Amino acid sequence: MKKVPTSLHEAIAQRDVSSVDPSFFPDNPTTTPIIEAMKVKCPYIMFLLHNRGADLARTDKNGRNALHHAALRNDIISINFLINRKCPKDARDNSGFTPLVLAIWKNNLANVRILVKNGVTVYPEQGPLHSMPLVTAAYFV
């Protein structure tokens, strides 16, 4: 008999598509279903969540959306998936960092290229100095 998952994380980890619901913990500020699926590298679950109406703009307690997390994890598949489905690519987290800045910080040139090729803002007009992509590149690279 198949064990029924008791949480979204378990459903995603078990790749139990029937238990994955984009409205899981709608008021939980610490994570989102898309972020959880991306963390365990389940692009199929991300695809299903998106097709069932999951909000790609939702953020965690640090103000990061799934694209921020994909950049932090050097996850090129998730980055492509999220960009192609219009996940906010210039969103700033609570520290003022964009996914581009996080990709630079992780020193992943392939992810930086994908983000830039898909139109992320390289020269923002405003924001804290420490969160400017070129400042980050000069400091961390």
Image (cartoon, rainbow, N blue to C red):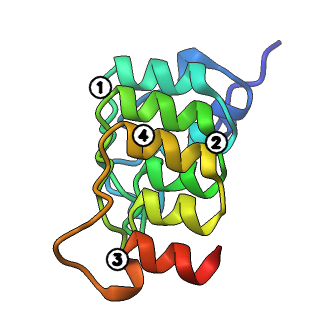
Mark pair 1, 2: CA separation: 22 Å
User: Does residue 7 appear in the picture of this structure?
Assistant: no
Label 2 packing within 10 angstroms: few (<14), some (14-19), many (20+): some
| Mark 3 secondary-structure assignment | loop
Q: CA distance from mark 4 to mark 1?
A: 12 Å
For marks 4 and 3 on the same chain, the one whose residue lies earlier in the sequence: 4
Disc 1 versus disc 2: nearer the observer: 2
Q: Earlier in the sequence, mark 3 or mark 2?
A: 2
**Amino acid at the residue labelled 2:** Asp
For image coordinates 66% across by 52% down, the residue present is 73
Q: Which residue is mark 3?
A: 96
Q: Nearer the viewer, mark 4 or mark 1?
A: 1
Determine which quarter of the picture holds residue 24.
top left
Q: Tell me, yes or no, if residue 112 can be seen here.
A: yes
Residue placed under numbered mark 2 in the picture: 75
Quadrant that contains the C terminus: bottom right
Q: Secondary structure at mark 4?
A: loop
Q: Which image quarter: residue 13?
A: top right
Q: Nearer the viewer, residue 133 or 39?
A: 133
Secondary structure under tag 2 reads loop
Residue under the point 41% across and 69% down = 133
Q: Tell me the tag on residue 53.
A: 1
Disc nearer the start of the sequence (4/1):
4
